[in-house]
Amino acid sequence: MAKLYLVGTGPGSSDYLTEAAVKAAESVDVLVGSQRALELFPDFSGERLLLRARNMDEMMKKSVSLVEEGKDLAILSTGDPGFSGVLKPILNIRDDLDLEVVPGISSLQLAAARLQIPWDDANLITLHGKGNSDAVLDLLDNGKATIVLPDFRVEKLAQFLLENGINPERKVTVCERLSYHDERLFKGTVKNVASEEFSYLCVMVIY
């Protein structure tokens, strides 16, 4: 059986792409990833397969099948494969593959760096693909900053917080398009964020 790499590509910019990630991606026959992840490897000459939210399950199974057929393959995972990435769905399909995980820099990690928050002393939670839930509410009053990867729209998360009794004036920062040239740090309140529009590439920090 060939080898499957799960390659963390970082928050988006090639500035945060590790040398280990580049080496792994350049060593395979097939590269699987989102459009923005694939664009990080413009010189790759092998087969490319586009990964979208709506074909995630299909592409995970196809990737495993291609490895079983003898092709070395890398699945590009934005951020880190082990945090709201592709590691869990792959292990749910097969846990006996010749598998190597190449870690990447998570957008949560970069948000903590930008805001100078020691992230070993913060609440970290992903709602990606799960929808807004009480899980985030349970973390908000333990005296730590809560760094959240929202489920697509950060303004919807802010609205959810308001609907569940969070103080509208509670301080938050939205880290938008981290690592890109148009990166933005929006500092305000839950109420402010609920009425603004942001791109889908956001991390929310709740104080």
Image (cartoon, grey):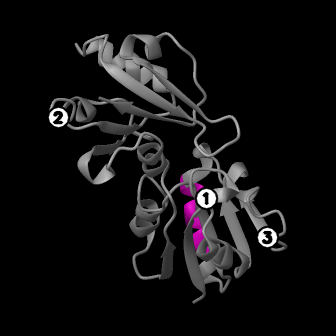
Q: Relative to residue 86, is residue 162 drawn left or right?
A: left
Is the residue marked by circle 3 packed among few (<14), some (14-19), or many (20+) residues within 10 Å? few
Q: Amino acid at mark 1?
A: Tyr
To which quarter of the image does residue 190 belong? top left
Name the image quarter holding the C terminus. top left
| Along the line of sight, the residue nearer the viewer: 195 or 49 | 195
Looking at the image, is 36 positioned above or below residue 59? above
Of callouts 3 and 2, the N-terminal one: 3
Residue 66 seen by the camera: no
Real-space CA distance between mark 1 and mark 2, rounded to the nearest whole angstrom: 31 Å
Q: Position of residue 26 (x, y in %)?
A: 73, 77
Q: Position of residue 51 (x, y in %)?
A: 65, 53
| Along the line of sight, the residue nearer the viewer: 10 or 115 | 115
Q: Which secondary structure lies at badge 1? A: helix
Frontmost of labels 1 and 3 is 1
Is the residue marked by circle 2 packed among few (<14), some (14-19), or many (20+) residues within 10 Å? few
Q: Which secondary structure lies at badge 3? A: strand
Name the image quarter holding the N terminus. bottom right
Q: Position of residue 202 (x, y in %)?
A: 52, 35
Of callouts 1 and 2, the N-terminal one: 1
Disc sitting over residue 143 in the figure: 2
Q: Amino acid at mark 2?
A: Gly
Residue lying furthest front? 116
Is the residue marked by circle 1 packed among few (<14), some (14-19), or many (20+) residues within 10 Å? some
Real-space CA distance between mark 3 and mark 2, rounded to the nearest whole angstrom: 49 Å
Q: Amino acid at mark 3?
A: Glu
Real-space CA distance between mark 1 and mark 3, rounded to the nearest whole angstrom: 24 Å
Residue tagged by mark 1? 16
